[in-house]
Image (tube, rainbow, N blue to C red):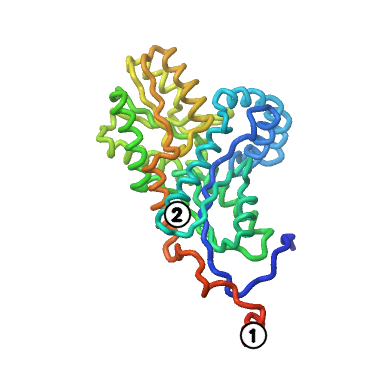
Amino acid sequence: MFKPAFNPEPPFTHGQAPRTAVLLCNLGTPDAPTASAVRRYLAEFLGDHRVVEIPRLIWMAILHGIILRVRPAKSAAKYATIWTDEGSPLKVWTDKQAQALQQVFNSHGEAITVRYAMRYGNPSIASRLDELKAEGVTRVLVLPAYPQYSGTTTASVFDAVYSWGLHSRVLPEFRFINHYHDHPAYIQALAERVRTHWAENGQPERLVMSFHGVPERTLHLGDPYHCECYKTARLLGEALGLNKSQYMVTFQSRFGKAKWLEPYTEPTLQALAQQGVKRVDLICPGFTSDCLETLEEISQEAKEAYLHAGGEVFHYIPCLNDSETWIQGLHGLSKEHMGGWSLQGPTPSSLAISREQALSLGAKH
């Protein structure tokens, strides 16, 4: 029978005051825009059975025999085009979101600790949970940065939490947010982002909403991602007062030769240009932080494809990042899922009792 090797932990203390944390979990990023760093990142990312559902032995041979020998250098060159002085945009924005959310909790007098973690790369979910536990956190709300649920993303975050728990004797109380694709605060933040852009640049002929793609077979296997993307798009279109002919949904970031969710983003943009659509605005609602897939794949590659096909004006509308409306939305979303948990900090009366009192209580039980 499998017996996990538990990590050493301090002795249990009676009367430990409950402390609550929000762990904002994003996908991840390489530590640097170099081939070696990208190789480490891709090995972890593409080695996740949630991400690639090909039989393990076959996929590992392909991954280590072909992909990790060829792709890292190409991907590193792409990362280099978006890298900032602060580091990877996805990590920078996720960090800023966590800090801003912490400030909102603080401003409300709510004793909540906010941290961010990456499913792949650093800081890992396991390392953050170790830190939180060492700080005395007893309750953790896991908040994935993915508004739409998918087994390839959201479920993988939960897997990482469960895996950490296998090696911990005393577990915090966990709550998980599965999705918020139709949450009013999320839709409001998206709509405000678009309206602000249009107030400065005017309105386009077509608004394209590009979501990250997944293999089509995930839809047939019961994954709700496809439906949740379309619901987000419908609600955003309604919030903006658009009819169905003024916006469309596409899917990007296809990998491999299998059929993925359609329509694909770049071919759709090329078709729009060839049909005479002169201006397109594109937003990526499924990404809450700008990253390689938005800044390089969309703002660079997709833009070039559209203009080369005959389009005249292409605007990429940035992700929610640390916009005030979105941070307030995250605050409200978190509080909804922490219902029943006290948001106040420890009081003197709730601090740990003495060893003598603990022994006395133990004798009574």
Question: At 41% across and 53% down in the image, what residue appears?
Answer: 107
The residues bearing labels 2 and 1 have C-alpha atoms spaced at a distance of 38 Å
Image location of residue 181, percent across then percent down: 40, 45
Image height of 199 relative to 190, above or below: above
Q: Nearer the viewer, residue 113 or 163?
A: 113
Occupied quadrant, residue 81? top right
**Residue at left offset 66%, top offset 31%:** 38
CB-based contact (under 8 Å), mark 2 and mark 1: no
Which residue is pictured at 42% across the width and 13% down the height?
309
Say whether residue 336 is left or right of residue 358.
Answer: left
* Residue 275, position as x, y percentages in the image: 34, 16
Picture residue at 41% right of the left edge, 57% below the top: 335
Q: On the rendered image, what quadrant is the C terminus found in? A: bottom right
Q: Is residue 199 left or right of residue 37?
A: left
Is residue 100 placed above or below 336 in the rendered structure?
above
Label 2: which residue? 106
- Work out whether residue 282 or residue 61 is closer to the camera in this orientation and state it: 282
Sequence-first disc among 2 and 1:
2
- Please identify the quadrant where the N terminus is shown: bottom right
Which type of secondary structure does the marked residue at label 1 adopt? helix
| Residue at mark 1 | 360
305 relative position to 69: left or right: left
The front one of 286 and 127 is 127
Query: At which x and y percent is residue 327?
Result: 41, 45
Measuring from the top left, give residue 99's x and y in whole percent.
49, 46
